[in-house]
Amino acid sequence: MVDISLIAMATGFVLILIGLYGALTNGNLLRMIVAFTVADAGVNLVLVSVGYMRGRTAPILDSAVPAAEAVARIIDPVPQALVLTAIVIGLGVTALMLAYAYRLYEAKGTLDIAKFSELKW
Amino acid sequence: MIKRVIALTLLAGLGLLFLGLLLDYRPDTDLNLSARYYAERTAPDLGAANIVTAIVVTYRGLDTLGEVTVLFLSATIVGLVLALGRRRGQAPAGLAPVGELLTTGSRMLTPLILLLGAYVFVNGHLTPGGGFQGGAILASGILLLLLADPLRHFSHGLISAVESLAGVFYVAIGLAGLVWAGGFLDNRILPLGDLGALFSAGAIPVIYSLIGLKVGAEFASMLASLAETEEL
Amino acid sequence: MPFDWMKIPYALLTLFIVFNFGMLLNALIQKIGARVGRRYGVPIWQNYADLIKNYGLRSSITHGVMYYLGPVFRLTGGVGLLLFVPTIYGSEMFSNLSFAGDLILALYFVFFGTLGMALGAGESGHPNAAIGITRGLSQVTAAELPFALAVFSVALQYQTFSITDIVAVQQAGFTSWTLFTNPLAVAAAMLSFLGSMMRPPFDVVLAPQEIPIGPPTEYHSSYLALMQTNRAIFPIAKIVLYMSLFFGGAASWPVFFLKVFAIYMVSVLVGVAFPRFRVEQSIRWFLIWAVPLGVLSIVLV
Amino acid sequence: MVSALYILAAALGAAFLLGLLREERRGLAYGLTLAALGFMTWVSATWVWAFATTALPPVEIFTAGTPPPFAINLRMGMGEAALTLLVNLVGLASALYLKETLLQLGRRAMAVLLIAIMALAGLILTRDLFNLFVFMELMAISTAGLILLSADSRALGAGFKYLIVSQVVSVLLLIGIIFAYHVTGTLNIDGMAQAPALLATGIGAIAAFLILIALIAELKPFPANGWALDIYESAHPAYGAIFSAASGAAVIFAVDKVLPIGGAAWLPVATGVGIATFLFSNLLALPQTNDRRLLGYSSVGQIGLVLAVVGQRDVLGEAYGFIAFGLLVSNAVAKAGLFWLSGTIEQRGLTAWAVLRQRPLALFAFVTFLCVLVGLPPFPGFYAKWELARLLAGEGRMALLAAILLGTLIEAGYLFRWFGYAIKREPEAAAEGPRMQGAGLATGWNRALPIAAALVAAWGLGFLWGDLSGRGNLLLALPLLFALAFLVLDWLPAWVKNTLAIGGLTGFFLLTWQEYDPLRLIFAAIFLIGGSVILLASYETKGRRIGFYPSAMLMYAGLVMLIRATDAFGFFAAWELLTLGSYFLILRGKHSEPHALSYILFSLGGAFAILAGFALAGQGAVHLPLDGLAKVAEPLAPWVFVLLALGFMTKTASVGVHIWLPGAHAEAETDVSPMVSGILLKAGLYGFLVLLMSMGSQRLHGVELTHVLLWIGALSALVGNLMAVFQEDAKRLLAYSSIGQMGYALFGLALMNHLGWLMAIMFIINHYVYKSMLFLSVGGVAKRTGTRDMYRMGGLVKLMPLSFIAVLIGIIAISGVPPLSGFGGRWITYNALLDSEVRLPIVILFLAGPIAFLYLFRLIHTVFLGQLKDEHRRIKEAPFWIVLPQMIYVAVLLVVAVVPGLVLRHVDNYLDRFFPQGGLEWTGTVISSNYGYWNPISIMVIVGVIFATLFAWLLFVNRRAQPVKQFNIVFSGERPFRPETTHFAWNFFAPYRKALGFLTTPLATRFWEGITDLLHNAGDLVRRLYTGNGQTYAYHLLAFVVAVYLIRLGA
């Protein structure tokens, strides 16, 4: 039976590729931003799926998982911590891109990226 | 058309890369070096029940500090970017009336959302979730208020005050760790208490609630800034 | 080595002999040219008459210092060249002041006169003078090259630059002349000799018909007299150099007169037969015919 | 010492505190920002001082009280301390520079600036990979924020493009990090580096690839750096300074930390990407017209160069830090300074920088930064490039060294072209803004201070790197100090400085002349005594003459250090100093800007060939004494010979590389032309002497190299003289004649026998004397008549007799006519030719000889003889100070003509050491060789006597002759009424041009113009790659990633 983490990772990768494809082919700024968020979601999915181990539980020490048995019972907590930071950073950049998109729209009245290419060569 | 073909070929190349990762990936059978250390040492050293919180707040505290700064930065820059925009000042014109269901729902739900958010970031070191998740919940409450009444004006002064104070205290705690305890952002400046209790795991709950407040405030300021650009 | 004063009277004696020989030779050659053209030609003493007339005249005008120095430079060049080269081989009396420098000095002293003349004529302000000089200088660059190559190949052959040594080697009968031991060099040198003798086909420089007598246009009376004296001495001095290098030099005066006359006739004979070259034609002619001979002479020595 | 964490904490604390202050308390907020930055700078400064003075090991800083693999640790070593100091200093200076903008935008902008600097410091200090990612993202976001400071509306577009690219980079980096963690079990960089096997195959290899390619992408590699250039062009210049100096340095240090995890296979990749970026960025910078975009290309190129150096760390060993930091620090200081300078100029065109001419101090800063960038002495880049070349050549990586030198040459090209515009061109639109007067650096004090700091830092670092290099600090060399002293004394009047200069030169000669052997003594005499004689002519110029004396003294300092140099480094440093000094001198001419540019390019090209030659000869040895060239191993020796010969040929303007000389010498000022022509060309010959003395003759593929030099010398003589014949401009005629004379001297040296070298020495002395004399006299005539075209002059002998005498003696000397010293040179030449077995080149040399007559006569006839023009009727003799040196030279020429032994005898004996047989015998007044004899005194006497008698006789006969008026000539009956029509000067040798004109077709000029056009068009074509569309830039990035992956897969 294929391990759940492989499925999650595969979907993560597919999401990344879809996101990047969207960012590359869509001229509209907002569509690009949404595409990047899709890619970020894919990345986060991959991050989480790396730490998973079959038949283990979440790394919370409580009545169900006493401190002594922790080593044998819990999955790898580090990717979980990393994904937390990755999500927040992804959000920060997306918020910034939205603000930029707004100002670009206000400046040129269009959302087509090709229109903002006066800086070239 | 040509753009699509090029995009597809490039992504095929990247996909090849990812395929290489996917196929050779063997999940671990038991915890690796760092995970094993965290599993064994978190309870006795830091006294935190939620290992992920322990990692996020203390072991990799600098990351979180960086992360909070990222959010602070985004909020500030969004404020800066949109402030530049608003200087030309458009007064919002007449508004479409808001649905009755939304106004009563928000009046009832908002306190509950805020309560849940507070609970999440206060118990960060015990139950799943923590500062960021709690802050996000708080922000969703504020978003609900905004949806209900788009003209509502949030006092930026209050939000940035909360934000700054939380940030300053966070850095102060970090420095305190450096001066009194083992290192920067070390949580052993407060008693560890016993595992599972509310007041345990040293400074972790304090830090995490500060983070919760700060994240909530930052989201609020971002939403407020974005709302004020509403061109009705 | 102490400078023995007796050399000066001997040198003046050589100068006197060569000067008179030059005057007569020029007149004789003009007479031969006329007789070929079925004319009587000038009397043999004609040059003396012109010279005395010019020396007698007193000019009251000058175009400035350099104009003054032009003829002086010219004659100094002619006389100097004669004295720096030993005329008669073997005789202490007639080796003139050749202690001062060797073949290279002679080679370069030829230009002393030309340079001085150029400056003087330039000063006169007459455009034709300048045009004549540019033609002369342009032609000289191409004409000098084969001669320099020939001289160098001779120097290579005899491994010396001192003229007396070169002549000494050629004393063993006329088969030992450079003419036979190094014919290519002599051929190149003789072609270049034609170029330097200001006779047709290379006399565009002072072309009588086209520009009133070229560089010395503005010169007259005593200035012209100096130039005429030089016109007598300078060709002979150059021929002495050719004679010493290529035709075994002269052991006595009669041999000297004969050889000089023979070499001079070479340029006359060629001159009679050919029309005048323009400057670029003459340059091309030298570079196409004379220079390869010179190069071959150096490579094959 | 305060722990490095306080740097991060202080910045964050201040940023958050700013939130508390009310909106209108901006002054206080600005004060707080400066205080925080000041504190951070102080902390890193104390660390740098601690590491510099005590042998402190790098300090590990743990967070969260737990050892590294399980928590984030920071390291503070010498490298980190220096870089954080650099970052904080640039941040502080930029904050100062941005005073108005920050106060206008309020506390938010200040917070963003603080966090940006903190992010960079974090990037440098952290040893944890994920933490590196967090700080990288912080830097990306704060960059996007800071771009908004710019008043340029296009900055928004640039910001958005940057965010797109940083999103793609973060995707790759995160995937790489998580799989690297999965494989190695740790996130600590050092932990990963210790387990290279894990990251060598399978997932580990791909993870390492993703991490490293993401980091390298952040370093703006070619072709994926369109976004960076847009930021440089549109961002506020103060931010441009931070972006290029600080963030460039921080990210390159991060790459340096993380590179080991990719194992040794990654070094060639880093080098490849780095060198490609360096070359292409410099190529694309050629066609740029916007100053900030040009600076952008240059900084992207420099970072590429440092990346290439990082890629060579295995070869560079312990000198790696010295080189990498040298290049990094030079780039940082120069770029920051240039960006701040660009802030004080309104228009963005390159010629707009001509406004700097009103601000001498700013102009000095501008040229200092350019020299720091190109890596000229005495700045750090010079020492770094020397060590780099030495080590690369030692490892046989000549292709890489060639690429680096080519890139640097192109960079020097567009930078000095820019400097030429600043000095000579007029700014297009008259800047209607406030006319900025006074010597100040910039308008506000807050803009002047950063520029001044960068200037002081540039010179200070030059001093520091001089000490660190262990090769004798250039700034402590007496001659260079003497030259720099004139910088300080530039406010004095010109004649005071002139006296000081002459005193300095002659004093130095008198102090040191015993130390030199006869050969070097001649060169010392020419450089010092000759230089001071020419300087006499400089008394002519009144006023202060800003910039002349420092440049002149720099050239003389370089020349003196050249002959006193004993090892390759000293020689090369002197070579570049004299090139720089002479470039500034030539640039002073009115229309000399294009020629000065071609001069500096050829000279630097030659200098780099010499650098490559010395590096190859050294084979990695730390010190290479000059006579060590003899001990170079066989397979390399010919190549070293070729490289060094190429370098020296650019200075003696041999045929092929001679096209810079005519313009440079003709357009220079009156007293600069003799210096540059009479003295500077000898440096090239001195180089050849050193080369031939140590290496002797070499064979390459069976071809005898000195034989090739013979042909080049002969051809230069022919081409030089032939071109001189057809010139209309007097100074150009003399310039081409110099090419011819240098061809003779090179021929003499290449004969490789006793008399050949003696001939070359004779030529060196003669050429200095008569070329300086002729240039001075022509300069004097040009000053009086106002023109240099010969056909406009004529008949000046009556009005300028002294100049005429000088030119007369000069042309007699050059043409080699007996009484004067020129004949001595010719006589030795003939004897030398007889000695050697050379045959064919002689033909060309003999043809070149008489041609000298043509242009000499043309010069003297058209200028002094012939018809006097109406407008010149009342001109006076040349100024006294210009005529005096000429008369000195006339005297010297006569003395050398009569007694050549005075100088040549010692040299002759000295040359016995190299070529024992074939010397001259000096018996009494006769000088005889194996083949002939020459008695200069007797020739002079005989000629003099004959001349005097005839002259006296003529004077006696024509006692009453009066000078006649100008037009009183036999003009076939007509009366010439206009001097113009009767002065034969224009197209003087028309028949000659018909005959041999085809030899003067400008093949070399066409060849070199072809190359420059090729580079320009290539640059113009390739830069179309950056279409300006943000999405296209994302394509470039992905294509770059996939391409590098395929290349690595293939390798």
Image (cartoon, rainbow, N blue to C red):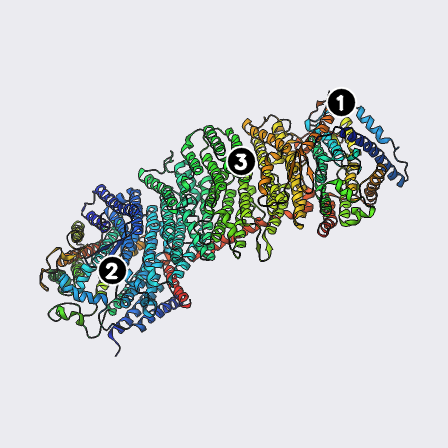
Local SS, label 3:
helix
Q: Spatial distance from mark 3 to mark 2, Cα to Cα?
A: 75 Å
Percent coordinates x, y for residue D632 in the rendering? 51, 53
Q: Residue D561: percent from the left, percent from the top?
A: 47, 40
Q: Nearer the viewer, mark 1 or mark 2?
A: 1
Q: Amino acid at mark 2?
A: Leu
Mark 1 highlights which residue? D957
Question: Image height check: is B217 above or below D424?
Answer: below
Q: Amino acid at mark 3?
A: Ala
Question: Would residue A35 be visible to someone looking at this image?
Answer: no
Look at mark 2 in the image and give the residue it sits on.
A91
Res B30 quadrant in image: bottom left
Question: Residue D525 has which mark?
Answer: 3
In the rendered image, the quadrant that contains the C terminus of chain B is bottom left
Q: Is label 1 in contact with label 2 (beta carbons under 8 Å)?
A: no
- Residue at the extreme bottom: A1
CA–CA distance in space, label 1 to label 2 = 111 Å
Residue depicted at x 85% and y 34%: C24
Q: Nearer the viewer, residue D118 or C85?
A: C85
Q: For the residue carrying disc 1, how many other residues have a C-alpha within 10 Å: few (<14), some (14-19), or many (20+)?
A: some
- Which image quadrant: the N terminus of chain B? bottom left
The local secondary structure at tag 1 comes to helix
Residue type, label 1: Val
Q: Does mark 3 fall on the same chain as mark 1?
A: yes
Q: Which mark is drawn over residue D112?
A: none
Q: Is residue D435 left or right of residue D770?
A: left
Q: Position of residue B116 (x, y in %)?
A: 12, 62
